[in-house]
Image (tube, rainbow, N blue to C red):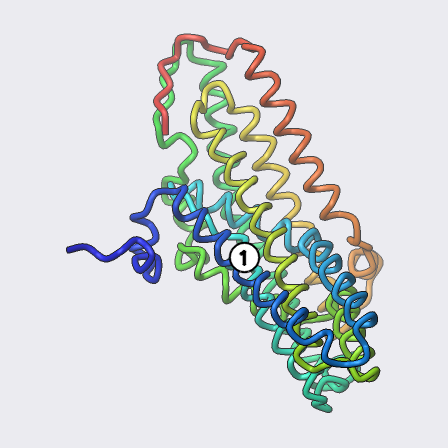
Amino acid sequence: MGKPAALTVMSTSGRESQPFRFRVGVTFAVIAGLHLVALLLLFGNVFTGGAAAVTLSAAGFAYVRGAMHSMDFDHVSMIDNSTRKFVAEGRRPASVGLAFSAGHSTVVIAMGILVVSGAGAVSTLLDGDSTAARVLGIIGLSVSGGYLLLVAVSNSVTFAAAWKLRRRVRAVDGYVVPAEAFTPRGPAARLMTAPLRRVRHPRHIFGLGFLFGLGFDTASTIALLMVTSSAAATGAPPLALLSLPFLFASAMTLGDTINGLMMLKMYEAAHVDPLRKVNYNLVVTGISVLSAVLVGIIAVSTLMTEEVGAQGGVLTAMAEVDTAYFGYALAALFAVIGLVAVLRWRRGHPPHRPEAGVQAR
């Protein structure tokens, strides 16, 4: 007798054997569970002390900041590019956003626990001049910058494949597009994708999300910890205070998961009919690669200027780039591209070669 479906998701092979809808359902069930824990901590304790109004207002702030944090440029770029990589390898992950956000949330919740418990280490970690804060910052920047630059190289192979396909379609009348048209192949492709060959499942993204979170110098994370600390000073119940990092993590996880699934849908659309959608594939893949390169360069530049002491016109300028709204712009750009593409396809816009015999992926 086989294992129940609910138990098979505990292993990688078990998850991959389940239907996509089931895996999406499990993903959102995890997010719902995180929300439930946060609400139980909040409403199970908020009325036991004398600071209910402070805690409730802080709870709303924490949730909104978590949602905003999911739109940070590095989050959007990281999830988009990781999803692109998996799709190019023939995979269909349902939890890239959840895995990355869960890793990031682990750091946020751990820090929240330290704040609530009154640990003095928190002030040291938040002090940018402390040795601990600098070491963690270096780890966070190194991982985020390095990974995104590597994944940009990996996805550029897919972009190159789409570009070659576009040229063949235009040059050869009646060209039959193979199902693996966008799958990286050949010695050069293997060499360029080799550094990330071990990143093959969403669970690998969890570790990256955790390391990303170690450099907690983002405005959203610092603001959350400051609000938690301030609410603690008013005498709010400790367990109610603990709901704040959980609320932050719940909103961030929901936003990251939705982003991952939306990008999965966009990238898969390009694989359904490569001949008709080759230009669409070029656009969305190209934007993802450029965003990863930009985030990676900014992270490396920040690391070089702040930790190594390197100075220079371009280097300093890149380190000082304000990316506060870049994530929103990137998400909006993808949404517009997707909407325009859907409208064109529904209007029956004729493909370049109507009878090319494209095989579905």
Tell me if residue 310 can be seen: no
| Residue lying farthest to the front in this orientation | 48
Q: Residue at x 78, y 72 (%)?
A: 55
Q: Position of residue 93 (x, y in %)?
A: 43, 47
Residue under numbered circle 1 = 31
Rendered residue at 39%/46% (across/down) = 22
Q: Nearer the viewer, residue 178 or 30?
A: 30
Instruction: Please determine whether, in this image, residue 73 is positioned above or below residue 138.
Output: above
* Residue 106 appears in view: yes
Q: Quadrant of the C terminus?
A: top left
Question: Residue 83, position in %: x, y?
Answer: 50, 46
In the image, is residue 185 above or below residue 253? above
Residue drawn at x 68%, y 41% is: 331
| Tally of numbered discs | 1
Q: Residue furthest bottom?
A: 120
Using the image as rendered, state which of residue 291 and residue 238 is in the foreground. 238
Q: Amino acid at mark 1?
A: Ile
Q: Secondary structure at mark 1?
A: helix
